[in-house]
């Protein structure tokens, strides 16, 4: 039986779950996590490229997915999209989508502790020219 993200006992499928019902513990031993954060000011695109290149060189096989919308001080954001060692050519938008003018990026990673990625990013924070705000961490 493959481990699932969400287990619901079949006896509850047609009825409402009791308020005291708890999901059974997950037996999934995978180390897959999503990690998202925001940049609070426009970032230095060259420095970010160096940081991302170093990360992908060192751990690219464990970066399952990366997606982001980055403020680099232009009128519109740069859209970033990649899988493992491959980063697709960035897309430069002419303007920001309505109500979304903040940089954010999401990594889905395998066997990379989020603390390691966060520490690496914080080490580059001065070169990036922005503050970093951890948004969310999820185990998948």
Image (cartoon, rainbow, N blue to C red):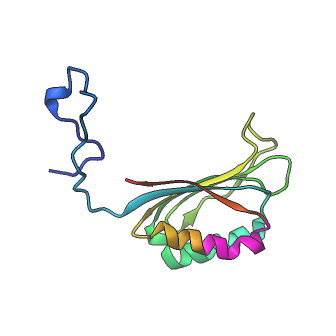
Q: Residue at x 56, y 59 (%)?
A: 82
Q: Position of residue 16 (x, y in %)?
A: 25, 22
Pick the front one: 60 or 109: 109
Magenta range is: 120-129
Question: Eyeballing the image, is 121 above or below 93?
Answer: below
Q: Is residue 118 left or right of residue 130?
A: left
Which of the 4 image quadrants contains residue 112? Answer: bottom left
Q: Is residue 116 left or right of residue 123?
A: left
Q: Residue at x 55, y 65 (%)?
A: 86
Q: Residue at x 35, y 64 (%)?
A: 31
Q: Is residue 23 left or right of residue 75?
A: left
Q: Residue placed farthest to the front in the image?
A: 20
Q: Position of residue 5 (x, y in %)?
A: 30, 46
Question: Eyeballing the image, is 8 above or below 131?
Answer: above
Q: Position of residue 13 (x, y in %)?
A: 20, 26
Q: How many marks?
A: 0
Q: Residue placed farthest to the top in the image?
A: 15
Pick the front one: 18 or 14: 18
60 part of magenta stretch: no
Q: Position of residue 38 (x, y in %)?
A: 66, 54
Q: Main secondary structure of the magenta part?
A: helix
Q: Residue at x 25, y 47 (%)?
A: 4
């Amino acid at each position: 039986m493959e481990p699932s993200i969400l287990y619901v006992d079949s006896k509850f499928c047609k009825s409402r779950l009791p308020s005291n019902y708890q999901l059974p513990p997950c037996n999934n031993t995978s180390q897959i996590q999503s990690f998202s954060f925001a940049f609070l000011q426009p970032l230095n695109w060259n420095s970010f490229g160096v940081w991302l290149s170093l990360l992908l060189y060192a751990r690219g096989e464990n970066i399952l997915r990366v997606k982001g919308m980055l403020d680099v001080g232009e009128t519109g954001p740069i859209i970033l999209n990649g899988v493992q060692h491959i980063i697709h050519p960035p897309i430069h938008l002419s303007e920001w989508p309505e109500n979304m003018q903040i940089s954010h990026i999401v990594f889905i990673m395998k066997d990379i502790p989020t603390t390691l990625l966060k520490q690496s990013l914080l080490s580059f924070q001065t070169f990036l020219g922005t503050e970093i705000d951890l948004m969310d961490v999820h185990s998948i």
